[in-house]
Image (spheres, rainbow, N blue to C red):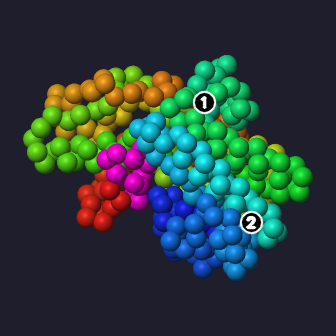
Amino acid sequence: MKILVTGGYGMMGRTIHSLIQNTNKKDNFIFLSRKECDLTKRNEVLAYFRKYKFDYVIHLAAAVGGLYKNLDSNINMFSDNIKINENILEACHLNGIKRGIFCLSSCIYPKNPSKFPMDESMVHESPPHPSNEGYAYAKRMLELQTRQYNKTYGYQYICVIPVNLYGPYDNFNLKDSHMIPGLMHRFYLTSLTGEKYEAYGTGKPYRQFLYSFDFAKIILTILFDKDTTRLQNTEPIICCGDKNEPKEYTIKNIVDILADVMDINKELIYWNTNKSDGCMKKTVTNEKLIHMYPDISFTSLEDGLQETYSWFIDNFDTIRK
């Protein structure tokens, strides 16, 4: 069995690679990098799939970034992700791949939903937040495309919808990263200067989080699920880091917890309210996931941040930054 992992050298690809190293499945995986194949180029993708004849696909690759990258790059975010997803799905179909995991994001959900928490049925309910509409609409189209392939050909192309991911191997770039890695890197550099610590926005928006290793375990659980009847309902599956009621944090909560992890004096933190808050709330429920896999477990945010920070310090010279 051959399993392709696109985005194989991003955070989730490297996390999956770490998880399988001591298992009997490690030789089944091929982790694809951008250098080996440009997923925005159809001919390259089709040739790559023909060469290796994969059985399963975990599609993680995407043009991604934090709030401020999305604000600046909505056109490219839409165009690149549409090309990537179209090429991957066509290659899967032409090569007879009947099962795959396709990664979406909770940021594709409506800006003004009819209810909270949002569930899997609400992905297309109304427009997403304009700050990331290029990325959001491209990912919404991936959900539509996989659904149509499943309906027409009987495939099991499963879309998973994680909330804000964080963990080792993340992109810690100060400009283009997501919130937690960018904040961690910025606070670390500030700690070396003795200056005040800058947090962006008002701190009022709410967010949910999922530790990368927890998400990797979910992906592998679904991919290797032998209960085919459980996967007959191929609607997306929301993945967030709690098992009961949706647990959400304000950005201020996150800053405070991270300050404790990094041993930072909170009185030295100031809020730059000239920076955008982005979407104020996008709470989702993972009730479907828990119903499907009731034994699943999650890492607490405090423990996940501690593990991430320890990895960040140990690997600072070589991390993506």
Residue 181 image offset from top left, x and y in percent: 36, 47
Please tell me whether residue 221 is drawn above or below residue 203 in the rendered image: below
Give residue 75's quadrant in the image.
Answer: top right
Q: Give me the residue at 13% from left, 48% from top.
A: 192
Query: Is residue 205 toward the left or the right of residue 284 in the image?
Result: left
Within 10 angstroms of label 2, few (less than 14), some, or many (20 or more) residues? many
Going 34% across and 23% down the picture, which residue do you hit?
202
Q: Which residues are magenta?
A: 166-178
Q: Is residue 1 visible?
A: no
Considering depth in this image, is 108 or 80 the residue closer to the camera?
A: 80
Badge 2 marks a residue whose secondary structure is helix
The answer to which quarter of the image holds residue 128 is top right
Of residue 81 and residue 22, the one placed in the foreground of this image is 81
Q: Is residue 207 among the parts visible in the rendering?
A: yes
Residue at image position (50%, 32%) is 131
User: Looking at numbered disc 1 in the image, what kind of residue is underneath it?
Assistant: Pro
Residue 34 placed where, x, y %?
52, 67
- Residue 300: x and y, percent? 44, 43
Q: Secondary structure at mark 1?
A: loop
Quarter of the image with the N terminus is bottom right
Q: Is residue 289 left or right of residue 107?
A: right
Q: Is residue 200 above or below residue 34?
A: above
Q: Is residue 175 magenta?
A: yes
Residue 128: mark in rendering: 1
In the image, residue 251 above or below residue 5? above
Q: Which mark is residue 281?
A: none
Residue assigned mark 2: 91
Q: Quadrant of the C terminus?
A: bottom left
Q: Earlier in the sequence, mark 1 or mark 2?
A: 2
